[in-house]
Image (cartoon, rainbow, N blue to C red):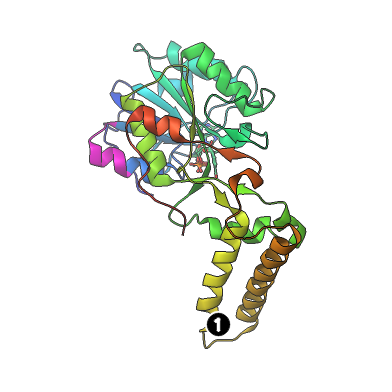
Amino acid sequence: MQITQHADRHHENKHVDLLILGAGWTSTFLIPLLEREGIAYAATTTDGRDGTISFKFDAESRDPEPFRALPSATTVLITFPLVGEGQSARLVSLYGSTHETASRFVQLGATSIWTAPTWHDDSSPYSHTDPRAVAEDELMAKSGGAVLNLAGLYGAARQPRDWVDRVVKTKADLKGKGALHVVHGEDVARAIVALHRNFTPGKRWLLTDLHVYDWWDLAQDWAVQTLRTTETDELQDDISIAKVERQRELLAWVGELMVEEGVRALPRETSRLGRALDGRGFWRAMGIWPIQGRLR
Ligand SMILES: NC(=O)c1ccc[n+]([C@@H]2O[C@H](COP(=O)([O-])OP(=O)(O)OC[C@H]3O[C@@H](n4cnc5c(N)ncnc54)[C@H](OP(=O)(O)O)[C@@H]3O)[C@@H](O)[C@H]2O)c1
C-alpha cells in the first residue's frame, strides 16, 4: 500500500485532522476515504513503510521521544490492541505531554467482549476481565476516548468464506457454530470518519453490518456455490477432487444437523444461534447506515 501523506512529510509541527496509529488492513479502506473527503491525515506503521511515520508503542517505556515524531491531531485513531491496565493511560499521557493541542482518542476493539448467548447492543454488559476491554475502559475514563468494537472484518482479499476451512474441521465444529457477525472495511472506514466528525466522548460502540448470519446457512450456500464452479471445471486434479468432496461433506453435515437438531429451514431462527449482536445504535446515532449489504 503506497500512502500519500495528505499532511506534510515533516510531521512534527503539522496538525492533522486524523492520526492513524497503525495503518494496517483497516487503513486500506480508510485512507482512500480520507483522501476523497479531503481530511488531512498522517499514518504510522511499526517500520515506517510506504511513507508512513515509523512508530511502535512500547507499553513498558516512559520515553516520550517516539511520540515527538507524531503530528498533533484532532482525532487519534488507535488500531492496534492495548491490553490490561496502564497501557491506555501511558499512551494518552505520553502523546499529551508531547503535543500542545488536546486530541480525542478512538480505539478499535472487537465484539468478542460480549460473550453471553443472548442479544447484545452497545449498552449490554461485557466481560470486564477481557484484557482489551480493561484497556478500552481505561482509555474512555482517562481521556474521554471512544471505542468502536468491531464485528469480524471483511473486504477485498479477506473473505469470510475462506474462514470455513479454519473454523469447521468436523461435523461437531459445525454443530457448535451459531451466529456470525461481520462488517466490511468500507463501512468501518465510514464509521471512523463519522465518529471523527461527530465525536461521542466516553462511549463504547458496537459495529456490525446489521445482519446476524447463520453459519450453517452460509456453509451450505457457499458449498453449493463452490460446487457449481468446481464441478464445471474440466480440470479434475487431486486438489479440485478434494475440494468437491469437502463441499459435499459440508452439505451433508448441514442437512444431517438440521434433521438431528429439529431445524426445519435455514437460516435458523436467531433465538437458536446463541450470541447475537444488535448494531443499530452506532449507525442511528451517526445518521448513516452501512452500504455494503449482506455477505454473498
Ligand atoms: N480481524 C478481525 O476480524 C477483527 C475483528 C474485530 C476487531 N478487530 C480489531 O480491529 C483492529 C484493526 O484491525 P486490522 O485488521 O486493521 O489490524 P492490522 O492490519 O493488524 O493493523 C494494525 C496496525 O497497528 C500497527 N501496530 C501493531 N502493534 C503496534 C504497536 N505496538 N505500536 C504501534 N503500532 C502497532 C501495525 O503495524 P505494522 O503494519 O507495521 O505491523 C498495523 O499497522 C485491530 O485491533 C483488530 O484486533 C479485528
In the rendered image, the residue lying farthest to the bottom is 234
Is the residue marked by circle 1 packed among few (<14), some (14-19), or many (20+) residues within 10 Å? some
Q: Position of residue 225 (x, y in %)?
A: 52, 71
Between residues 86 and 148, which one lies in front from this camera angle? 148
Write down the residue under mark 1.
231
Residue 30 in sight: yes
Name the element at disc 1.
helix
Q: Is residue 221 left or right of residue 146?
A: right
Q: Is residue 86 magenta?
A: no
Residue drawn at point x = 42 percent, y = 30 percent: 282
Quadrant in the picture for residue 119: top right
Q: Residue 190 location, x and y as percent?
A: 35, 38
**Residues in magenta?**
32-40
Q: Magenta stretch containing residue 37, yes or no?
A: yes
The residue under the point 59% across, 22% down is 135
Q: Kindly identify the amino acid type of the residue bearing the numbered disc 1.
A: Glu
81 in relation to 292, above or below = above
